[in-house]
């Protein structure tokens, strides 16, 4: 003889039985539906104005945000992207700047060259667009052996910190006794560069 189930328990059993009738494939695919419908994207025509430049020169990067619609790549106005830089010897990529595409989907941004490394641009994902990353571009930055300081300046640039005195042909390194008191006529990138130019080290 069967014993009647309490009303609350019977309701729970009925609900569980109803859920069991829902096809497993339908339940599994539901959360992925939005991702599956997001369109593919790409940062097309990613370029640099130069791939080998002296330090502190300006390098301009350009690209166009595109999305794949009906098997055709089309511009994506207003898309958001981030420019990344992987400096030689650095531990990880660094996000340098976030920019927005213009009305034609075009990006353009400039940086002062400070070190050699690899640049990429990454399109941010949205509810309807997938994320994507450009092919990398390597930019080599060269460091001249010497440079002239700004007129009247007592300082040398950080990449050429060695102060040279033209009249004595003596050079002074940071931390030296007369370094702060020397107004440079020329700045060298290294002591070796100063020696090659005919300068000798300060004895103090």
Image (cartoon, grey):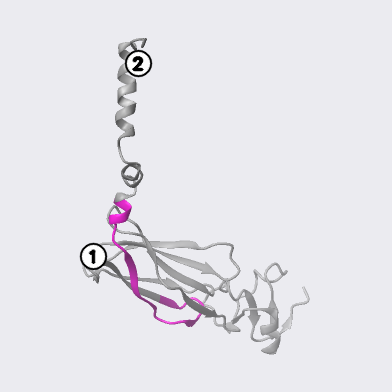
Quick check: is 58 in the magenta stretch? yes
User: Mark 2 or 1, which is nearer the eye?
Assistant: 2
Instruction: Please indicate, yes or no, whether residue 91 appears anywhere in the rendered image.
Output: yes
User: Which stretch appears magenta?
Assistant: 34-59
Characterize the local packing of mark 1: few (<14), some (14-19) or many (20 or more) Cα atoms within 10 angstroms: some
The residue to which callout 2 is attached is 9
The residue to which callout 1 is attached is 77
Identify the residue at image location x=48%, y=74%: 113
Identify the residue at image location x=66%, y=78%: 190
Where residue 91 sits, quadrant-wise, is: bottom right
Q: Quadrant of the N terminus?
A: top left
Compared to residue 106, the image places residue 26 above or below, namely: above
Identify the residue at image location x=46%, y=82%: 51
Q: Position of residue 93 (x, y in %)?
A: 51, 63
Give the SS element for disc 2. Answer: helix
Where residue 2 sits, quadrant-wise, is: top left
- Mark 2 touches mark 1? (CB < 8 Å): no
Quick check: is 101 in the magenta stretch? no
- The answer to whether 196 appears left or right of 153 in the picture is right
């Amino acid at each position: 003889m069967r014993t009647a189930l309490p009303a609350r328990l019977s309701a729970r059993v009925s609900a569980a039985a109803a859920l069991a009738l829902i096809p497993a494939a339908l339940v599994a695919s539901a959360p992925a539906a939005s991702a599956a419908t997001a369109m593919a994207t790409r940062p097309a025509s990613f370029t640099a104005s130069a791939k080998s430049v002296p330090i502190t020169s300006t390098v301009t990067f350009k690209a166009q945000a595109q999305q794949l619609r009906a098997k055709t790549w089309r511009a994506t106005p207003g898309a958001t992207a981030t420019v990344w830089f992987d400096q030689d010897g650095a531990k990880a990529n660094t996000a340098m700047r976030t920019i927005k595409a213009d009305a034609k989907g075009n990006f353009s941004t400039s940086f002062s060259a400070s070190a050699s490394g690899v640049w990429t641009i990454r399109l941010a994902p949205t509810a309807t667009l997938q994320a994507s990353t450009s092919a990398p571009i390597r930019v080599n930055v060269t460091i001249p052996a010497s440079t002239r300081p700004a007129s009247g300046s007592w300082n040398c640039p950080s990449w050429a910190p060695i102060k040279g005195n033209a009249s004595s042909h003596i050079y002074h390194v940071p931390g030296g006794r007369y370094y702060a008191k020397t107004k440079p006529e020329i700045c060298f990138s290294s002591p070796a560069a100063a020696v090659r130019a005919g300068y000798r080290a300060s004895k103090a």
